[in-house]
Amino acid sequence: MLVRPLTSSDVDRRRLLVAATLLLSIGALPARTALATFGLDDVAAKAQQLAQEPFQAAKDQVPEWMLKMDYDQWRDIRFRPDHALWQHEHLPFQVQFFHPGLYYDRTIAMNVIDAHGVHHVPFSSNDFDYGKNEFASQIPQDIGYAGFRIHAPIKTPKYYDEVIVFLGASYFRSLGKHEIFGASARGLAIDTAESTGEEFPYFTEYWLVQPASNAHALTVYALLDSPSITGAYRFVIQPGDQTMVDVDVRLFSRRDIRKLGIAPLTSMFFFGENTTRSFDNFRPEIHDSDGLMIENGTGEWLWRPLDNPRTLQLNGFQLHDPKGFGLVQRDRDFDHYQDLETRQEIRPSIWIAPRGDWGDGRVELVQIPTKKDINDNIVAYWVPARLPRSGEPLEFSYTMYWYGDDLTRPPGGRVVATRREPGSHDGAYRFVIDFAGRKLDRLPADSGLRGLVTVAGGDDAGELLDQHVIKNPVTGGWRLSFQVKPKTDKPLELRAFLEKGGSALTETWTYGVLP
């Protein structure tokens, strides 16, 4: 829930309430149980205190020689599954850790919260199998972990699969029951796509709450730090067909921030059916996500196909109190990828559902040109219209869904393919958009569907030509095709949806035509 920035009076009242609650708890409960009342308020107190101090950049946490190991050396370091946290307690969750080195030059502090209190989890090289590497004896004994992953029996009752991974800066990634890892999320984005350069906050400390033997969810707390801001996070992780993660955040700024990205998502789009290619590749498409989906506060759903642009592309969708947004992998047909190794047709979609009123702001989409499919070049996040000033706290909450496909998002017809080519008119582009949906597909060919296509800026910006809608007899869906001829040398924004009798039957397709 995103609420008004907290005042100093609010903070003082919260401190008094927390202190009073703790005193009552200590007086009413056994001592060792009272120690386990650690929660988000405690992490927030640490974050607020940290924000009042100068930022201390982490230095020399990992020896230089460990950062120079190659990828194969780092990958050959494996955590021993029989050393997993809670493995011997037979709990519904287990935790394994990542070794620092290579790209991971920072370590994290790990803690466990149980009925006896809060306990530090020390690093131990005995937890790892170093494979062919011969430097195990040189690893500093107290170096710390680079990150961790949570396992649970999500696919079968007896095997503990990876469910969510926290590794690198404030990055984490998860999946649903039938997916493999793909797109990622971050705790926070600061000054993304700004000329001043992006600032990357880090999670520096975590607290894992030991679950009960019948628990369906696991709670993780995290402390975030950066030159501009600190933060306290609570993640409640519930694995399933769609893995749900409830996120509650309290931020404390050290200085004024130019742009704040809330609930940021990161993915890869190399090329798709809408991309003009100048190179050979045996795969028809390569992407972890193929569109940005938005549900605005008025009931309209938007679909923005992703692309790999020639230059950096930045688009903002102004909204009041959004109902959701996400990076979606909608194309689930293996034949469209033909990649037996990456299996991009089973990469997860990520949907952000705000809790509470997020007010005014915009969903921002950043598309970065890339020449390789190993680069995450797509970023999406929410930018609140009002940013906190230096010293002001800020709160927000949301639920994340990591899933394969969900026909309720959107509830009506959806875009399943976007294709483009040079038009038959000089200087024009032809667009072919396929729509599908359970109710939409049942409509007969003579239903009188109409495509409503608009050009931002009207006739002065671009001319619409040859527009028509037909039933697709092969797929059962509907196809909208049209040509548009730009009249200026500026980017052209298009919108389109199918309607009947004045009622929209589909989400709204949006697209940007670059000059």
Image (cartoon, rainbow, N blue to C red):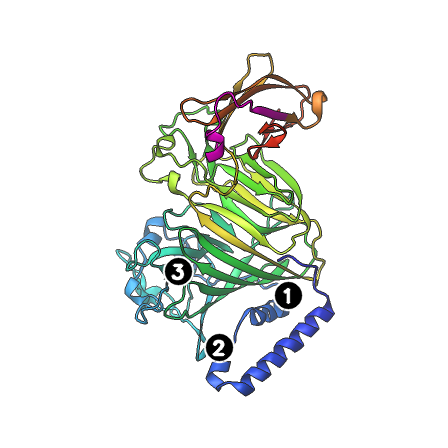
Q: Earlier in the sequence, mark 3 or mark 2?
A: 2
Q: Nearer the viewer, mark 2 or mark 1?
A: 2
Q: Nearer the viewer, residue 287 or 457?
A: 457
Tag 2 residue: 36
**Mark 3–mark 2 contact, CB under 8 Å?**
no
State the CA–CA distance, disc 1 to disc 3: 29 Å
Instruction: Kindly identify the amino acid type of the residue bearing the numbered disc 3.
Output: Ile
Amino acid on which disc 2 is placed: Ala
Classify 41 as above or below 177.
below
Which of the two discs, 2 and 1, labels the residue nearer the N terminus?
2
Determine whether the residue tagged by mark 2 lies in a helix, strand or loop: loop
Residue 444 painted magenta: yes
Element type at mark 1: helix
* CB within 8 Å, label 1 to label 3: no
Indicate the quadrant containing the C terminus: top left, top right, bottom left or bottom right: top right
At which x and y percent is residue 445? Answer: 48, 21
Quickly name the residue at label 3: 150
Instruction: Classify 10 Å Cα crowding around label 3: few (below 14), some (14-19), many (20 and above).
Output: many
Q: Is residue 99 left or right of residue 443?
A: left
Query: Residue 293: x percent and y percent?
Result: 54, 40
Vertical relation: 484 (above or below) 260: above
Q: Kindly report the distance in space between the C-alpha atoms of the residues bearing marks 3 and 2.
A: 21 Å
For the N terminus, the quadrant is bottom right
Q: Which residue is mark 1?
A: 51
Check residue 450 for magenta coloring: yes
Residue 371 appears in the figure? no
- Residue that sits furthest to the left in the current view: 132
- In the image, the segment drawn in magenta is 436-453
